[in-house]
Image (cartoon, rainbow, N blue to C red):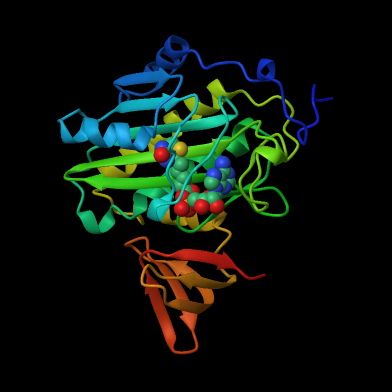
Amino acid sequence: MPEHQPDDHPSIVDRPPLNESTLFLACIEKSQLWQQIKVVSETGSTNDDLLVAAKSGRAEGAVLIAETQTAGRGRLDRQWSSPPRAGLTFSVLLRPSSIPPVRWGWLPLLTGLAVQQMISELTTVDSRLKWPNDVLFGPHRRKGAGILVQVTGSAVVIGIGLNVTTARNELPIPEATSLVLEGEQQPDRGALCCGILDRLAIAYTNWRSMDGDPVHSGLRSAYLTVCDTIGREITVELPNGQIIHGIATSVDESARLIVSTENGSQPVAAGDVRHLR
Ligand code: BT5
């Protein structure tokens, strides 16, 4: 039995801190991509911090993990909120400069896949992906993780927010959930973080070695297998406010969602998707 009911406010003793040196040793043993892993108890936003670092020339492979963020970001200046040590909030700095920018749209999808695969491997929680940047948990397909990719020059900062022991009353919206709320009894944040970094490094290195080609790297087919959006009736709100309604049929080689509408097929590069059924 879990030590607390997840709907209660869990005590901080159920939320041990991450250990920077353990994480660093475990991660560099597995992958050459990660050069530096830093854990801070608090910052504004790990994405903001690595964007600043990228602008001042920091090399690929930096990882910044915060036990809590005071100004965590979502897309379009939305917020990401997570109480101290209740989840994972971290960012990585990559420089995919050899890859044509038209293929960089695969980075949030590739990252989501790494998160989804590690959740499947390390927990009993069923997870699926919602295009382009959400990881959904459990039978009700609630949002348990989100991904934010930001570009500055030749650098890309990828941020991941994952709810681990977050209680219902700590989540900002009813459609959100956490691993514990979906029944996972003792999720280990350190193992999850290290596993996600490892899986992300493998997927990124493979994708990059194939010149970013999503088909030959196997990325596209792996993504489509676990993407809950495909085959669903959806609406997409585009950045200009326009709403598209139709059936999501696929994701193309530039990571755009293909929506079959009454006016024909429409590729969507960015937008907020709602699954209707
Ligand atoms: C995202 O944006 O889902 C991207 C979230 C990325 C967060 C990470 S944490 C580490 C790194 N540093 C940062 O500052 N950010 C990244 P979007 O699709 O725009 O979703 C944002 C919306 O999700 C909000 O408007 C809320 O409705 C909802 N939300 C906020 N916090 C949540 C949480 N903990 N769990 C589930 N949903 C949440």
| Residue sitting nearer the eye, 12 or 113 | 12
Residue 175 % position (x, y): 65, 53
| Residue sitting nearer the eye, 155 or 75 | 75
Residue 253 at least partly seen: yes
* 43 w.r.t. 71: above or below: above
Farthest-out residue, front = 70
Q: Image point 44% across, 14% down: which residue? A: 20
Quadrant where the C terminus is found in the figure? bottom right
Number of numbered tags placed on the structure image = 0
Q: Quadrant of residue 55?
A: top left
* 249 w.r.t. 32: above or below: below
Q: Image point 51% across, 65% down: which residue? A: 273
Q: Is residue 37 left or right of residue 127?
A: left
Residue 134 at least partly seen: no
Q: Is residue 251 left or right of residue 105?
A: right
Q: Image point 56% across, 66% down: which residue? A: 274
Q: Image point 43% across, 86% down: which residue? A: 264
* 201 w.r.t. 227: above or below: above
Farthest-out residue, top = 21
Residue 50 % position (x, y): 29, 32
* 95 w.r.t. 230: above or below: above
Residue 261 % position (x, y): 49, 83
Farthest-out residue, bottom = 263
Q: Quadrant of residue 154?
A: top left
Residue 149 % position (x, y): 35, 46
Q: Is residue 173 left or right of residue 90?
A: right
Quadrant where the N terminus is found in the figure? top right
